[in-house]
Every structure is written in structure tokens, then in C-alpha cells.
Image: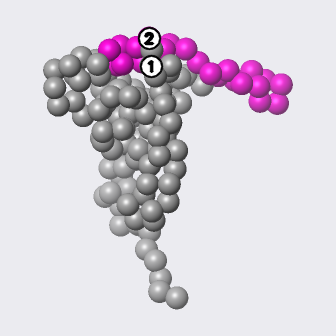
């Protein structure tokens, strides 16, 4: 149900106005009604069923695997910058808030926010 219902959508950057394709579910991910909450819970349940699977690939004649939970975590970090929104997949991860990848990501963000070595731009 989860993978089957992922559909492409266009996301337009507020800053650059560039468009990119994202994959999202056909529901509002910030539920406003009981029915929307039930649908979101159904997708969460369907997602939790696939998290025990891995994507297998061949790297230099060596079979490697990446857990689907990790792949979707990375995708959500990149595509949605781990922000909630009507199209964001972030709410799907509520049950996995303490996964290794999410904990590492949060620690990285906290360290970056507290760092004095942030990126700066010089005028040319």
C-alpha cells in the first residue's frame, strides 16, 4: 500500500523557483480530520511492514544491502529537509524517531547549529 501509493509531484522552491519532482502520498500529511488521521495511520502501518526489507545491489561483485528504512530516511532528509508539510513524508517516521540514522541526523544538526564554523559568503 505505501509504495504503491507513492506518486510523483512537483515541488517549486520558494527561493530559486526551480521545480523538482518529489514522491508523496495522496493524502494531506498534516491531518486536519479524523478520517485523514486514520489514513495517515494506515500508511504508517504499511510503511512499518516494509522496514524489515533491504535494497540489494552489486558493488564490485560484492552484494551489498541497504535497509529500506534507511533509504526512505535519506530520501526524506534530502527531498523535504526533514520538515513537516502537507506533502512531506516526515510524519510517516513517527514510529522510527529513535532509529540510528535519525538520531545521527539530529545530533549533526544540533552540532551544526551550535558551531561557530558555519558557512559564510565573501562578497566578490
Q: As displayed, is residue 119 above or below residue 92?
A: below
Q: Which residue is mark 2?
A: 49
At x 47%, y 40%, the residue is: 9
Q: Secondary structure at mark 1?
A: helix
Q: Is residue 46 magenta?
A: yes
Q: Earlier in the sequence, mark 2 or mark 1?
A: 1
* Residue 36 point in image, percent of width and height: 23, 24
In this view, the residue in front, 112 or 53, is 53
Query: What is the magenta range?
Result: 42-65
* Residue 26 point in image, percent of width and height: 38, 28
At x 40%, y 47%, the residue is: 81
Residue 32 appears in which quarter of the rendering?
top left
Q: Which residue is mark 1?
A: 2
Q: Quarter holding the N terminus?
A: top left
Residue 118 appears in which quarter of the rendering?
bottom left
Can residue 123 be spotted in the picture? yes
The image's colour scheme reads: one colour
Tell me, for residue 27, which label it has, or none. none
* Residue 71 point in image, percent of width and height: 53, 30
The reply, left or right, for residue 56 in relation to residue 37 is right
Are there few (<14), some (14-19), or many (20+) residues within 10 Å of tag 1? Answer: some
At x 22%, y 30%, the residue is: 31
At x 44%, y 68%, the residue is: 119
Amino acid at each position: 500500500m505505501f509504495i504503491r501509493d507513492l506518486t510523483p509531484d512537483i515541488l517549486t522552491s520558494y527561493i530559486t523557483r526551480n521545480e523538482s519532482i518529489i514522491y508523496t502520498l495522496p493524502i494531506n500529511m498534516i491531518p486536519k480530520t479524523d478520517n485523514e488521521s486514520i489514513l495517515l495511520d494506515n500508511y504508517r502501518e504499511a510503511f512499518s511492514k516494509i522496514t524489515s526489507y533491504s535494497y540489494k545491489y552489486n558493488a564490485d561483485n560484492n552484494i551489498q544491502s541497504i535497509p529500506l528504512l534507511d533509504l526512505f530516511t535519506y530520501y526524506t532528509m534530502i527531498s523535504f529537509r526533514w520538515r513537516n508539510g502537507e506533502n512531506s513524508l516526515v510524519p510517516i517516521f513517527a514510529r522510527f524517531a529513535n532509529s540510528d540514522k535519525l538520531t545521527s541526523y539530529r545530533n549533526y544538526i544540533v552540532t551544526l547549529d551550535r558551531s561557530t564554523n558555519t558557512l559564510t559568503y565573501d562578497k566578490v
